[in-house]
Amino acid sequence: MDWDTRDAALEILLQSAQKHATLDRTLDAVSPGLAHLSQPDKNLCHAIVFGVLRHRNFLDHIIQSFARIPLKRMDLPVLMALRMALFQLRFLDRIPNFAAIDTSVTLVKARNGKKTAGFVNGVLRNAVRRFHTLALPDPHTDLMGHITIVHSIPEWLARRWLARYGPEQILELCRTINQVPPLTLRTNTLKIHRPALSDTFAVAGHPVQLTPLSPDGIYSMESGTRIEALPGFDQGLFAVQDEAAQLVSLILDPEPGHTVLDACAGRGGKSLHMAQIMKGQGQITAMDTDPHKLELLETEARRLGIDTVQCRVLDLMKADHTDFPHYFDRVLVDAPCTGLGVLRRNPDTKWKRSFQDIQRMAARQKKLLNAAANRVAPGGILVYAVCSGEPEENEQVVTAFLKKRKDYVLAPIQDCFGLPMDRYFKTFPNGMNMDGFFAARLQRLTP
């Protein structure tokens, strides 16, 4: 089905609201219905979707301030249409008020009828007239209310972060989370060096900056440009990958000729980066339980010209010596996690996670790490990584592992890229312009 811009945005928001639906998968599923849209219209669609998810609590606060019906009594499509309109009214300067209101009223009228459309029209026009009367929590007198409403952070998570980081740091973190993240590229060093790729972009009129920590990273300073339209895409000169994710592969430090296992490979960004680090020499086994993700990995490997990655659909927890009759020099466990370190890129996650999810993920992570440890050669390196900053998924997993596995020690991370860290690798969105990651480097002792 072909949608217009706001029909598409509404459909994406409704689908991604389902408990087990991720925004990434939803965007993939609806992409055929967006093919007819111009690039500016696609950009607007994505801006509305991500904006509504980033600012949901703030938008709901506005709705509840100017509507007589409680939010929980509104049909979800009606609530989403109100959020979409208010996001455009408050955050998108180029959208006239009448356009934001009329398009949302039309959406609701088509789905819910004329009466409900009249209700939406009334709420939105009332909000426009009375925005100046909107009461918002003051950070000095009601910090929790300010964080949860103005910065749209779920209360349970805000309490955890406030206790851990303190008032000043949590406000900086929350502001950063609701910003649009940079587009970060990884140079395919098997084909081109970073300075040459940077020059290629400059000649084509695409401004870029070099990442300060990853030697392969480049920030694209343009917004709204299709990845496929960037110079060098068809030639496989670069891949999309956040700087923090690039650093994780460098921490593993695979060498040419090594055998490497990426135990939870997903779409394989780190597998393919490791192939670059190894200069195309050696063998990488990319393992995952999702065959679709591995298909995407293989497609990307062909584009980049990488042939040293072998994909296997296999569950690490069920693998035994018959699946892997030999040890690996390097093993990476980029474990499934709550994803609370990448809320800038996946804002839907914060509305679907709970403290119980952290506990559940941590229990699984401990099992995955122990299973992966059995595949590492004596003297080899095992890296545990997650895109979460929660202690239960970070230090506590590693501490429990080292308490159980006396054949492993925590290995130093080589100078940690100049970052002020000691035992573990940690990055944060605020102040570092990259995703939130945690990693630990573990070495198996030689008998």
Image: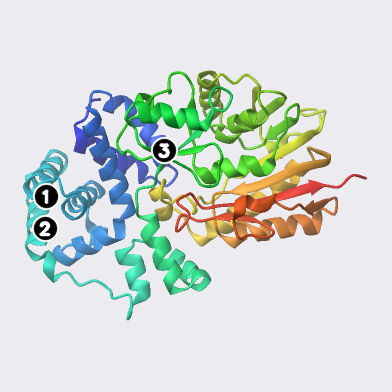
Q: Residue furthest right?
A: 447
Q: Is residue 54 above or below residue 292?
A: below
Question: CB of mark 2 within 8 Å of CB of mark 1?
Answer: no
Circle on res. 123: 2
Mark before the other along the chain sequence, 1 or 3: 3
Q: Secondary structure at mark 3?
A: helix
Judged left or right of residue 420, residue 221 is: left
Q: Is residue 155 visible?
A: no
Q: Is residue 315 visible?
A: yes
Circle on res. 24: 3
Q: Nearer the viewer, residue 438 or 34?
A: 438
Q: Is residue 4 above or below residue 391?
A: above
Circle on res. 116: 1
Cα distance, mark 1 to mark 3? 31 Å
Crowd tier of the residue under label 3, counting other residues whose Cα lies within 10 Å: few below 14, some 14–19, many 20 or above: few
Q: Nearer the viewer, residue 75 or 139?
A: 139
Give the residue at x 25% y 41%.
10
> Mark 1 or mark 3, which is nearer to you?
3
Cα distance, mark 2 to mark 1? 11 Å
Locate residue 170, reporting x and y percent. Answer: 43, 67
Locate residue 228, reporting x and y percent. Answer: 38, 25
